[in-house]
Image (cartoon, helix red, strand yellow):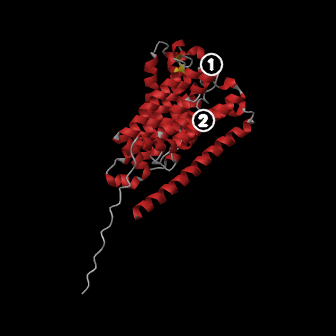
Amino acid sequence: MTTTLEEPREATPSRGPRRGPAAALLRLLKSRETGVALVLILIVAITTLKNPAFLVSGDGFRDLLVTPSILLVVVLGQAVVIITRNVDLSVGSVLGLTAYFVGTLFVAFPTIPVPLMFLIGCAFGAALGFLNGALVAFGRVPAMVITLGTLYAFRGINVWWTGSNRINASDLPSGFLRLGTQQVLGIPVLTIIALVALAIVAWYMHNTRGGREFYAIGSDPAAAELYGLDKTKRVLAAFVFSGMMAGLAGVLFAARYGTINSQAGDGFELEAVGAAVIGGVAITGGTGTVIGAALGAFLLVTINRALPVLGIPDFWQRAVVGALILGAIVLDRVLAKREHRRLIEKRDR
């Protein structure tokens, strides 16, 4: 009778996630947000070398900050919706309808406080977002179909309501219009409002259970429901939030431009989706950050402003933006496959 004794195996060190400042810095450098920020800085630098007024002049610096602000606010809501594996194509129409609603209220009640108008605009947008969310969450209808329908429905209501009229700057209170031009320490007020909203949403999505549930639902809806997460409630909340952000953007639009007609906000829906995707929010849901989406908004708007300065014909601008979106989608796919292989290898060790 023979007995086989196995040699004791050497203990292998744990391969858990690295911690410490160096590891955090490495993760930051490898993040999608850092890549988008570097591309943004590169475009600003090249354009400034071509025309220093693009950044160095007072108006150039102000426009660089204030022009993306409205899109940034819209993108915050769009990013949350996309993270839940949905999309909101109605945000441009909600923005336009809210902007005209705000202008009409100012015409009817000129002394209404400006802060109250912000609350009214957000509530109005949230109500329109609730309609989208209810149809998607309770009706179980694809979000693209529902919001494509409400995009045209809200725009049609706006055109019917507006007719050939428009709200002019002379119809709006001067205190409200000053929001579009005022600065604090050289930073436009509209930019400050957008950045405050970004900070709040980024903190919520990263640090709270509710924020993580949005990611869980977008990553694997079936598993999230088996785990006990209320998918209907979260999807509804995402659309209400998206509508609220579009409503806030409508108020900012009215303060920024002063003139509001039936075409206000036209095209914002596609720009918001494009900015979120460029910023690293996967169109299939579950990954990405609102900070990346905000950087995507800055990058998209800055490219549109930089290309004419660089002498690139107008018809190439949309092609460049389209190439960026396609590149971002391909990059997401490549990174997702690489991560899948890495997890498989880690499991099989």
**Residue type marked 1:** Gly
**Residue type marked 2:** Leu
Q: Which residue was labeled with disc 2?
A: 40
Is 208 placed left or right of 251 in the picture? left
Q: The C terminus appears in which quarter of the rendering?
A: bottom left
| Count of marks, rendered view | 2
One can see residue 267 in this view:
no
Residue at 54% from the left image edge and 28% from the top image edge: 69
Q: Which residue was labeled with disc 1?
A: 58
Of residues 141 and 326, which is closer to you in this image?
A: 326
Vertical relation: 147 (above or below) 175: below
Of residues 55 and 203, which is closer to you in this image?
A: 55
Residue at 72% from the left image edge and 33% from the top image edge: 310
* Label 2 SS: helix
Vertical relation: 291 (above or below) 7: above
Residue 150: percent from left, percent from top: 52, 40
On residue 127, the disc is none
Query: Disc 2 to disc 1, how far (Cα)?
Result: 19 Å
One can see residue 57 in this view:
yes
Residue at 39% from the left image edge and 50% from the top image edge: 17
Q: The N terminus appears in which quarter of the rendering?
A: bottom left
Residue 19: percent from left, percent from top: 39, 45
List the single residue furthest toward the bottom. Answer: 1
